[in-house]
Every structure is written in structure tokens, then in C-alpha cells.
Image (cartoon, rainbow, N blue to C red):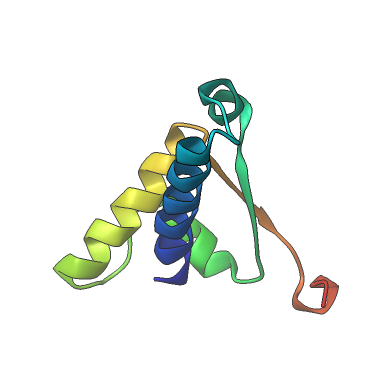
Amino acid sequence: MALADYMLEGELIEDFLMDLGQLMDDDLVTNVHHVHQDNTSTITTVKTGGGKASKYMKVRQEYVKENIETGELEIKYIKNDQHAC
């Protein structure tokens, strides 16, 4: 759920910056959102769309999966003790 929320908030921020003229459409073409995740099950679930979940959760999973497939989101596994504080 947090990953889907992150994507939605990121889109809102991009729209806001475009409205201010601080971000051009060309920047969005090459801009990939990088996410570090320490849970391999979460990575697998959002990449494949699998797992048991409610209809609401499936919609959110599909949203994240679409962003991965279009190249707007890249998820990288990182061990829990490697997170930057």
C-alpha cells in the first residue's frame, strides 16, 4: 500500500512542479522513480500481481505493476541494515 501511495504522491508533486514551470515534459521522459525495498515478497507481489488480496489491494498492486512495466518505477532490493538514515 505504501508503494502505491508513494507513486500517487509522486505524480501529484510532478504535476505541481509542471504547473510552476520547474519541470518540463522532457524531464518526465527520462525520470525513473527508484525505490529501495527490503522485502522480497513485496517486490515479487508488485512485479507479478500475485498473492491473495482484496479487490482494493489488487487495484493498487496493478497500478504499481503498470508503473514498473512502463519504466516509470524501478524497485531495487536492499538489505534492511543498508537503509540510509
Point out the image quarter for the C terminus: bottom right
Find residue 64 and report its horizontal and vertical position in percent.
40, 51
Residue 23 placement (x, y as % from top left): 58, 33
The residue depicted at 61 percent of the width and 38 percent of the height is 32
Q: State the quadrant of the N terminus.
A: bottom left
Q: Residue at x 32, y 50 (%)?
A: 63
Q: Is residue 59 left or right of residue 19?
A: left
Q: Is residue 78 above or below residue 24?
A: below
Residue farthest along the left direction in this orientation: 55
Q: Could you tell me residue 40's position as x and y percent?
A: 59, 66
- Give the percent coordinates (x, y) of residue 17: 53, 43
User: For the point 30% across and 60% down, which residue is it?
Assistant: 60
The residue drawn where x is 25% and y is 72% is 53
| The one of 62 and 32 positioned closer to us in this rendering | 32
Question: Where 18 sits versus 42, above or below?
Answer: above
Q: Nearer the viewer, residue 22 or 70?
A: 22
Name the residue nearer the viewer: 47 or 57. Answer: 57
